[in-house]
Amino acid sequence: MFNGTGIQAPVLQTAPQMPSPSSEAEQQKSLMKMSPPDNNSSFRNRDSWSRYWALQPDHSLPGTFDAGYGQAISSFWQGIAQRLPDTASVLDLATGNGPLPRLLLHWRPDLSIDGIDAAQIAPTWLPPNKAALPRFHSHISCEALPFSNASFDLVTSQYGIEYSDLNRSLAEVARTLRADGIFAAVIHSSGSRIVDVGRDEIAHVRLLTAPGGAVEQVRKMAKLMPAASTSEGRRQLDASPSARSTRDEFNNAMTQVRAAATVAIAPDLLFEFLRWVPQVLALAGNEPDATSALHECQRHQLQLEDAGERYDALLKAAMSTTQQAQLASYLATFDLHLEGVSDLKQDGHLLGIAISARRR
């Protein structure tokens, strides 16, 4: 039966040993493979991030970390911050909404920080007392930094530089670092829990956004909700084979989503979707033509596709153990001398690799 709302609310259920590189030519070849193509995909990814940062999340992984990124990552950056001279200048690459500058200023309010990102960014948080406001620069790539030679005491990247063309971005890091300056980065590892979550999320996005998928079924159901708001309309819907088929397809889609959520490593996206569905159907039932609800379906579809775009880029950027080893050795090509590399773990799960090097 079609009822007043059309549907009941869903029931929600230490440093690794680095292998020696083969040859400089092979290192460069491998690193070049990690360089993203300069095509429309790059622009889509940039625009996806711009829309994401406009929502003002703390950082790119809000379902995984709080604003402080957890003990393992926070401790690494605190150690880096403590090594800097007074009033040191810092450049944060792929800064997003500036979670790393915010963290660094918590410990070192004397720092002068610039942050760049290829996306449109406009962080709204305020620094702690006595700390200078960081300078954020949108539509700037790691491969072409608009800063003079030897401008910074520290260049940082947190889940960022590995998305870039490393041959060009590392050259820019070396160029903008002062003598004895530090390059420090936390990079995605292909064996990390974050990558596992990314694979899960991509599968969920496909389940929801595919032709005939759950979002499309919500859209079709929303078109019936104005009629379902009256007793006569519900009688007509119950008598319509087409309406009954739409209802059955919708219910089957919701069953698939709930089933996927029960076995997911990271079901947050699916649970969010299941909470959203009764809201958008209720919205559809309160207007004569479901226009606002259909616009909301379109917005949610784009939001999901953006998430899929970002997770796909993450999986492509994540470095294998071999690539991590080659990166550590390749730093020397730019006169960046490796100081340390270590696994970052939380609750027994690998989060990524921390690496630091000093400019000679």
Image: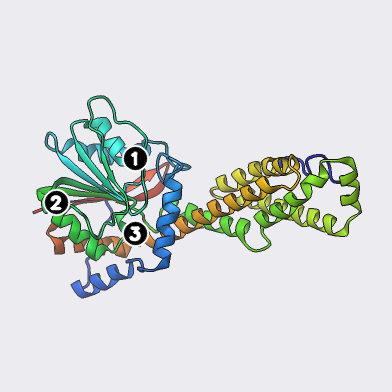
Q: Quadrant of the C terminus?
A: bottom left
Amino acid type, residue under disc 3 in the picture:
Tyr
Q: Is residue 298 above or below residue 165?
A: above
Q: Do callouts 2 and 3 mark residues in contact (Cβ within 8 Å)?
A: no
Q: Earlier in the sequence, mark 1 or mark 2?
A: 1
What secondary structure is found at the residue carrying circle 3? helix
Is residue 91 something one can see in this rendering? Answer: yes
Q: Is residue 2 left or right of residue 112?
A: right
Q: Is residue 337 left or right of residue 50?
A: left
- State the mark number for residue 99: 1
Circle 3 residues within 10 Å: few <14, some 14–19, many ≥20: many
Give whichever of 104, 96 is nearer the camera: 96
Q: Residue at x 45, y 54 (%)?
A: 48
Q: Residue at x 66, y 52 (%)?
A: 257
Q: Earlier in the sequence, mark 2 or mark 3?
A: 3
Q: Do callouts 3 and 1 mark residues in contact (Cβ within 8 Å)?
A: no
Q: Which residue, given by chain and number where applicable, does mark 3 sit on?
A: 163
Total marks placed:
3
Q: Residue at x 90, y 44 (%)?
A: 232
Residue 194, how many percent across, how many down? 43, 51
Residue 188: image quadrant is bottom left
What secondary structure is found at the residue carrying circle 1? helix
Q: Earlier in the sequence, mark 3 or mark 1?
A: 1
The Cα atoms of the two marked residues, 3 and 1, are separated by: 18 Å
Q: Is residue 154 above or below residue 26?
A: above
Q: Is residue 235 left or right of residue 266?
A: right
Q: Which residue, given by chain and number where applicable, does mark 2 sit on?
A: 177
